[in-house]
Amino acid sequence: MKVLSVSSEVFPLIKTGGLADVAGALPIALQPYGVETKTLIPGYPAVMKAIRDPVARLELPDLLGEPATVLEVEHAGIAFLVLDAPAYYSRTGGPYVDATGKDYPDNWRRFAALSLAGAEIAAGLMPGWRPDLVHAHDWQSAMVPVYMRYYPTPELPSVLTIHNIAFQGQFGADIFPGLRLPAHAFSMEGIEYYGDVGFLKGGLQTAHALTTVSPSYAEEILTPEFGMGLEGVIASKAYNLYGIVNGIDDDIWNPATDPMIAQTYNATTLKDRALNRQRVIEHFGLDDDDGPIFCVVSRLTWQKGMDLLASVATEIVHMGGKLAILGAGDPALEGALFAAAGRHRGRVGVSAGYNEPMSHLMQAGCDAIIIPSRFEPCGLTQLYGLRYGCLPIVARTGGLNDTIIDANHAALQAKVATGIQFSPVTAEGLLQAVRRAMHLFQDRKVWTQMQKQGMKSDVSWGRSAERYVALYSSLVSRGA
């Protein structure tokens, strides 16, 4: 089976969050099942710099008003199709924002162009290769099935994965002419959304199947609390909605072989985590004592519950815990966390920005990872935590609920607990979860058992890849 995957970011070429990890790992996980995936990605400067000896496969002289070339290249075991369109992607900022942190005003055109290029490839315009199915990811490529539906080309089966429904790609109606879609596409059955243009909404309406990145999130987005205004559209497509939990690349995230950590280890040599712990202490300027180190590796946003963490930082310190925080996001939340670090030197350390090697080291050296998200489609950091013996403390929502077994009395007795869940997602709820962790940490036998149980968890893509293959096969066999 041949699959065209379309994503705005793919690890290891470009990454701002979990979408990149999924878009990079899934094609590799599908290979043993005979699925040949080519992944279309924008030609950002970082991408163009990283690839070697690409081959031009398709010229698009007028891609929504700008010339573009589709380049093919293999990188890190992934077959990439890179959309080389300097007018759209040769920017000094990030994939979505400029150097000042503001959204590019032409993001609608940049990602409509990506989607249109995907639809053109799906229609067979690229010589020598045509997919059997198209898999789009999030709002940035949600217009692929829209173009496939409304353009006068043969329509293939399509899958749209919702990684985070909070990001919808909603733009003013004035952009519609620039999309070059027929007039009837601007309707409730198409991309019209409360008088605006909705990229994700259009994808939900036109894709043949929808997936989310965990079973719980698939249920949650059918409700007004989590559906972000799209719950009605999703409910109308519920018969083709599937919750498939994410996995991780367990070759990259493997404490026994990880080159990014100070000392490798496995479940039988947990004492070797000590050197990693020491490196974390040095990097964050923490006191070298026996108190547990709670880490956070996250975007610093309201969704991720970082305001809750900031509000209880002092209480965590007073209980004897230490905090190591890596991330960037809302300036006010960054400021609150840096203020906590200033008040509690040696007990709270903050490192701003994105740092892949440091995120590995923190999982390998910290005792627990705190993930107090108000909603979390799947989450990957808790899976990394399981793999590295860094016990997850998580809100009971979305994929966090699906992947962590709470250390309640029954689970501890059965020796199956892998972390701590809490609800409601409030400051007091988080604080109570940390208290539970502090109590469990005092019993080294119990704590070590939980670490080992977590490290035994199957967090790979294996079972999830099988579910994707089954979904793909059903769509292809029935002609969508």
Image (cartoon, rainbow, N blue to C red):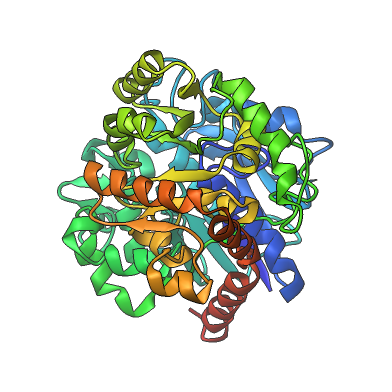
Could you say which is closer to the camera, residue 88 or residue 236?
Answer: 236
Can you tell which quarter of the image residue 386 is in? Answer: bottom right
Image-based side of 228 in relation to 217, left or right: left
In the image shown, does 288 or 187 lie closer to the viewer?
A: 288
**Residue found 37% across the figure and 35% down from its top:** 319
Q: Residue at 23% x, 37% y: name it.
A: 172
Instruction: Classify the position of the N terminus by image quarter.
Output: bottom right
Name the residue located 51 percent from the left edge and 45 percent from the top edge: 368
Foreground: 244 or 281? Answer: 281
Residue nearer the viewer, 268 or 43: 268
Residue that protrudes farthest toward the bottom in the picture: 478
Q: Is residue 96 above or below residue 367?
A: above
Q: Quadrant of residue 85?
A: top right
86 w.r.t. 39: above or below: above
**Picture coordinates of residue 186, whole percent (x, y):** 24, 53
Q: Is residue 47 left or right of residue 8?
A: right
Q: Is residue 171 above or below residue 223?
A: above
Residue 101 screen position, x and y as percent = 40, 21
Q: Please tell me how many numbered marks the rendered image carries.
A: 0
Specify whether residue 124 is in view.
no
Q: Position of residue 29 (x, y in %)?
A: 69, 64
Query: Where does the image place residue 294, in percent across and percent down from the top left?
Result: 48, 38
Q: Is residue 463 above or below residue 368?
A: below
- Which residue appears at 31% of the width and 21% of the height? 336
**Which residue, as the protein is rendered here, is positioned at the far right?**
53
